[in-house]
Amino acid sequence: MTKLIIDTDPGIDDAMAIFYAAAAPDIELLGLTTIFGNVTTKTATRNALRLLEKAGLDLPVAKGADVPLMLPPFTPSAHVHGEEGFGDIPAEAPKGQAITEDAADFLIRMAREHKGELVVCPIGPLTNIAHAIQRDPEFVKNVKRIVIMGGSLEEGGNITPYAEANIYHDPHGADVVFGSGGNIVMVGLDVTHRILCTKEDFTSIAGQSPDLGGMLQEMSKFYLHFYETVGKFDGCSLHDPAAVIACTHPELFETRSVPLTVTCEGEESGATVVDPESLRAGTAVCMGVQSEKVKNLFLQRLALLP
Ligand code: BDR
Ligand code: CA
């Protein structure tokens, strides 16, 4: 059983990842922390609460940083995820509220309480994780692993030709994480661009899971439309679910251990770069994936939901 905290900016594929974690029998979800990216941190917090309530999970949600470590805030990616984060699904207030502890403090405390066992899966910009590392030097030693959705080694970017969106939105934060010496896994575009779901896949999910799967099908329409406009893919990428799956099924991914730094300025800002001169510990970068197996796990487990 993997003890997991997801750091998230929900977001359509974030919703897919969170519902997957809710369905997975090998995941013990301990809570969610929130971050800007697809939406503002305030909206991300509301959406995270709403997703947990929809999934019938009474778990803590800790609100994260409102702005990147050093850069001014970016405009949320409304053209990819919709104004409210869930495509055309209208905003809805959750019943519950976030805990008083902020995301970094919650992560630090949970890493201490579950020393050596906690896996943290950031599927948004890495600001909260950077704050946790800067506030507590023991944080990266206390966690078992940090499995990041973000970055790109050879695939090129998705928000600029050089950068993947999560890293681009806080390059300084990402650089702190890759330089932390922790046990870091990067699930980037090199693999997530090979794990695609189609309209038919979401129809099938909704057929088996009318309530939660139905919600994903509804929001996937907006996301699939964005991918159609990009024109390169036959379906939409399962970015965030792939990272959650990598937490429990590392055998489905091939990794390359490389020291990484992040470009923090200029045209290539947000690029994840192999930098042997940095003398940093290697990040395990996913370069190969058994795409069909990852996708089937996603489809099979979502089908277990109501
Ligand atoms: C990442 O950026 C966001 O739009 C997605 O939710 C995912 O985390 C993909 O680049
Ligand atoms: Ca995300």
Image (cartoon, rainbow, N blue to C red):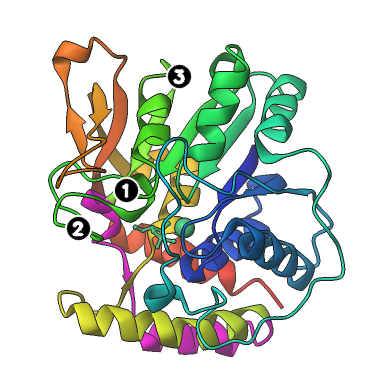
Number of numbered callouts drawn: 3
Relative image position of residue 12 (x, y in whole percent): 50, 71
**Image side of residue 240 versus residue 59, left or right:** left
Task: Point out the tag, 2 or 3, that comes first from the N-terminus.
Answer: 2
Q: Which residues are magenta?
A: 189-211
Instruction: Name the residue: 56% across, 53% down.
Output: 8
Q: Is residue 1 visible?
A: no
The quadrant the C terminus occupies is bottom right
Ligand 1 within 8 Å, label 3 CB: no
Q: Which residue is mark 1?
A: 168
Q: Which residue is mark 2?
A: 160
Relative image position of residue 137 (x, y in whole percent): 57, 12
Instruction: Give 263 or 195, whichever is nearer the viewer.
Output: 263
- The residue furthest front is 72
Ligand 1 within 8 Å, label 2 CB: no
In the rendered view, would you say 225 is above or below 35?
A: below
Q: Real-space Cα distance between discs 1 and 2?
A: 8 Å
Relative image position of residue 206 (x, y in whole percent): 56, 86
Asked if marks 2 and 3 touch (Cβ < 8 Å), the reply is: no
Relative image position of residue 2 (x, y in whole percent): 62, 38
Q: Is residue 23 visible?
A: yes
Question: What amino acid does circle 2 point to?
Answer: Thr
Q: Is residue 192 magenta?
A: yes
Dot 1: what SS? Answer: helix
Question: What amino acid does circle 3 point to?
Answer: Gly
Task: Point out the tag, 1 or 2, that comes first from the N-terminus.
Answer: 2
Q: Which residue is mark 3?
A: 182
Asked if marks 1 and 2 touch (Cβ < 8 Å), the reply is: yes
